[in-house]
Amino acid sequence: MLAPGDLLQLKSKNLTESQIEEQLSYFMKGFPFLEIKSSASVDKGILRLTNEQQDCFIQMWDDYLSGEKQITKFVPASGAASRMFKDLFSFLSAPYDVPTTDFEKTFFDGIKHFAFYEVLNNICKVNEGKDISGLIADGQYKDVVFNLLEDKGLNYGSLPKGLLLFHNYPDGARTAMEEHLAEGAMYAKNAENRVTIHFTVSPEHLPFFRKLVEEKTPVYEKKFGVTYDLSFSTQQSNTDTIAVDMANAPFRDVKGHLVFRPGGHGALIQNLDALDADVVFVKNIDNVVPDHFKEATVRYKKVIAGVLVSLQKRIFEYMRLIESGDYIHEQIEEMIHFLQNDLCIKNPETKFLEDVELVLYIKSKLMRPLRVCGMVKNVGEPGGGPFLTVNPDGTVSSQILESSQIDMNNPEAKNAFEQGSHFNPVDLVCALKDVNGKKYHLPDYIDKNTGFISLKSKDGRELKALELPGLWNGSMSDWNTVFVEVPVETFNPVKTVNDLLRPQHQ
């Protein structure tokens, strides 16, 4: 199936034959659906905190920051913004020349409220000899959109979201990346006032990010009285996955070369694993708001971080007790209750285990990466949700699942998905080291059976693409996971350009 030229191609991507064989096997056999016990809720699996409890956890986080710990903000920022402008690209190719759809009308009605309005206005003057108002007055709507999206203008149709101007301020507009710099200074600076942020970006965009960092970092260091430690990484080529045709044979391009596709955000578990940090915040590049709306974001980031370090403290206490060997039966029972009530891990076999077996079981569950995930009430936004699912070892624990992982032909599973009260806004804080300060090797905790297959096309031909287990789904499947309810005000994604007209982005 693989020719000598294919092996050279694999070598160039640092992939092995066995990896390709494993990927091809998934196309043949597919992925199993996960067994769901129920969707998580505040009655079962999601922690709802009182204001007093929140204040306590915020204090715990502030105390933790005063120590010598490495805190990092991890921002996946490699996605192109093209999907943001899908409707505007459609307008450019439409047979009509004036805004016709609701989306098009909303865009032009609110055009002066976009943070990129001034730079777009200037580029229109240069390229068209008219400002935006003049172009609109003359019915040249498509020229405005062309100058926004194409490389002759701002090239927003090809740039990543992180480089787009999102919000207006009296002293100038900010990009999404700059908003993460501001956020980091508000909840992730250490005792030395250092803010560490890591962005994952596409190789072709890396020079643009570096240039923006060089220009803007001194501005925000002065504004917030901090020092930034900013770094970048790209998705590793050995996380690409092979594509196949409809008969599950390797898909080849017109030159006969194997076709590979990015493995999805699950590939970023390698980038996360490469960080040397005690605590890592994970948040998407587009979920940011202007400073005057950041209060809720900052408060609840500190809350979930406080929950994390509180849980970690107890885990470390129990691990030291286990390693000392100096414990009694009542303390073992306390640890079991901690697993069940605080980490939401249920094991129907626990009652049959003797003390030595119980301790080994407890140790196996405590010695894992830990994450606390903010969950917002379901308001109809797309995305995964919190569930209580059955693991390969028969235990039940908290997991974030996407619809592709759920058997929608199973009435009970479908009902659990549709009746879920909360969803995942990608609001995570993670603890990546064990009781001895040693980093966990994160790839060891991936459930490889949680990937999925999607249909794509290339050169006018259909193909099947393999998505790796998602970063906050199957890639973190074997982590200790705790859900905390956070308000919907903390979730303000920008999926389309018109989302920037929402009050939260003005």
Image (tube, rainbow, N blue to C red):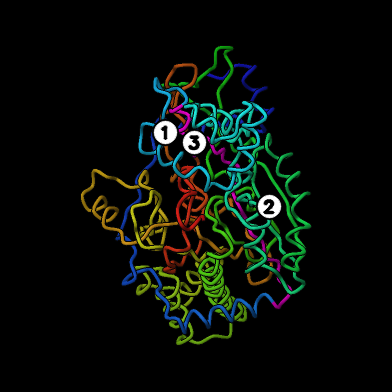
Q: What's the amino acid at mark 3?
A: Phe
Q: Is residue 59 left or right of residue 502?
A: right
- Say which label, 1 or 2, has the lower sequence index: 2
Identity of the residue drawn at 50% across and 26% down: 140
Q: Are marks 1 and 2 in contact (CB under 8 Å)?
A: no
Horizontal and vertical percent for residue 264?
52, 40
- Residue 296 percent across, percent down from the top left: 50, 69
Q: Is residue 464 above or below residue 45?
A: above
* Mark 2 neighbour class, 10 Å CA radius: few under 14, some 14 to 19, many 20 or more: few
Q: CA distance from mark 1 to mark 2?
A: 28 Å
Q: Identify the secondary structure beneath mark 2.
A: loop
Taking the magenta stretch, the answer to whether it contains residue 495 is no
Residues rendered magenta in the picture: 66-91
Which residue is at the far left? 411
Give the CA distance from mark 3 to mark 1: 22 Å
**Residue tagged by mark 2?**
274
Q: What residue does disc 1 label?
A: 454
